[in-house]
Image (spheres, rainbow, N blue to C red):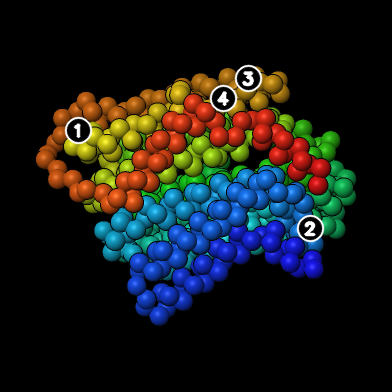
Amino acid sequence: MDYLHDLTSFLPGIVVTVASLIVIMLAAFKKGMNSIYLVSIGGLVIALGLAIQSLFGDVGTAFSGMIVYGGVGAFGTVIVLLGALLCVIISKEYLEEFGLHYGEVYAMMLFATVGMLGLAVSNDLITLFVSLETMSIALYVLAGLMHYEKRGAEGALKYFLLGAFSTGFLLYGIALIYGATGHTNLLEIAAAADGSLLFFAGSALLLVGIFFKIAAVPFHMWTPDVYQATPTTLTAFMATAAKSATFVAFILVLTRMLPGADSGDWTNVIQVVAILTMIVGNLIALAQDNVKRMLAYSSIAHAGYLMVGLAAGTAAGYSGVLYYLFAYTLMNIGAFGVIAYYERNHGLDFTEIDSYAGLGFKMPIMGVMLSIFLFSLAGIPPFVGFIGKYYVFAAAVNADLIALAIIGVLASAASVYYYLRVMVFLFFKEAHKEYTMKSPGLLFKATLVLLAVATIYYGIEPVLPTTGLIELLTSYYAV
């Protein structure tokens, strides 16, 4: 009955797959959008419940070692499903406002989620590649949703071309690794690796493909244009769920394929890329007047903070990265959700920072919530973003990477300027003209309020202390 064991080990992904097929059929037969919306939410809720349950289950491999279940994979699955669910919930009103509320949009979000779930549990390079492409192709479609606008078409084309280019690096790297070791399973590769030039080159190309997906410098060029051109709630989906899945896959590669004597070389590479990513992301964000482009460069900088935890190469570092991904999902979806609300009131071009002048008093709840999310992104206590940064920087210090941690802290301190700048316009600048603000829907407002409360609560009382994540990782390593 191994097939039953295999199916149950990937049950959240199977549930989302079934939901995506139902949604695409409902859209094909022109059924009501409310039905499609509810099926999408229902599928993700069921899958999330199953994923949370798997956090407390056994740890092992399935599908002949192609995927893992439990431990890190389960935690990554929870983060991806949480991000996908929140983004689907807040998308309805926004997409309706701009005439983009199609059933196919939800189908693409669900198909992308299936790819992300596969990515988060990959134990084989073939699984990793297929999952990455499933996610990427769906995201290319979502990025081009506003193809009728010049920036929409330009952003989608840039994302597709650069994504295809990075996929070539990834696939060629897999081919070289297979040529050097004769295996695609991560553990079998680690056992057969001999430190040859062929294996080194393959691993380097594989990491280049991963760096592109997480928008690490110098593979970040696509991020600001794509984030600005994509509908805002879908931008949140790309920035959180997709990034979380790729980082979890990155952890799997580092801990299972590259854990040997040569891993120190990759630690040095990750340190250099992390430093470049933190510095470049924050410096360019300082000069941005468009809020979505500012958050795009901010997203690049956060990828650098996450890589600080990876560079530590310890269980504490990896657990810090996982917690940071959870924190980042909460605060980033919240920030993009409020921006989507402002866009819904005043049009797609309503993302220049001077447009926010005086809006903090027009709709105080939205202004306060955006401030909470921005404070958290800046890493100011007592918000969840501070705890996430503390975990990754503390892991780096404990691993004797003190210089890297200091650079990370200084880069995070510099980010305070461009986050607070938005709040200055919200509450301390006079409005240029009078705006009429629409009242957000109950579900939309409740979701943002829940995210704001969670951002504060989990900053004061972390949901999963580092020790708990270390236990998950320790049991996972025993597989």
- Residue at 34% x, 31% y is 371
Q: If you read the primary sequence from the N terminus, does the residue marked by circle 3 or circle 1 appear first?
A: 1
3 vs 1, front mark? 1
Q: Which residue is mark 2?
A: 65
Kind of residue at disc 1: Phe
Kind of residue at disc 4: Tyr
Which is nearer the eye, 276 or 79? 79
Q: If you read the primary sequence from the N terminus, does the residue marked by circle 2 or circle 3 appear first?
A: 2
User: Which element carries disc 3, helix, strand or loop?
Assistant: helix
3 vs 4, front mark? 4
Q: Residues under labels 3 and 4: Cα distance?
A: 15 Å
Q: Is residue 323 visible?
A: yes
Q: Which residue is mark 1?
A: 361
Kind of residue at disc 2: Gly
Mark 4 closeness class: few <14, some 14–19, many ≥20 residues within 10 Å = some
Rendered image: mark on residue 403: 3
Q: Which residue is mark 4?
A: 390
Which quarter of the figure has residue 358?
Answer: top left
The spot of residue 267 in percent (x, y) is 71, 33
The spot of residue 475 in percent (x, y) is 77, 41
User: Which element carries disc 4, helix, strand or loop?
Assistant: helix
**In the image: residue 300, left or right of residue 179:** left
Q: If you read the primary sequence from the N terminus, does the residue marked by circle 1 or circle 4 appear first?
A: 1
Kind of residue at disc 3: Ala
Q: Residues under labels 2 and 3: Cα distance?
A: 39 Å
Q: Residues under labels 1 and 4: Cα distance?
A: 33 Å
Which is nearer the eye, 140 or 237? 237
Rendered image: mark on residue 389: none
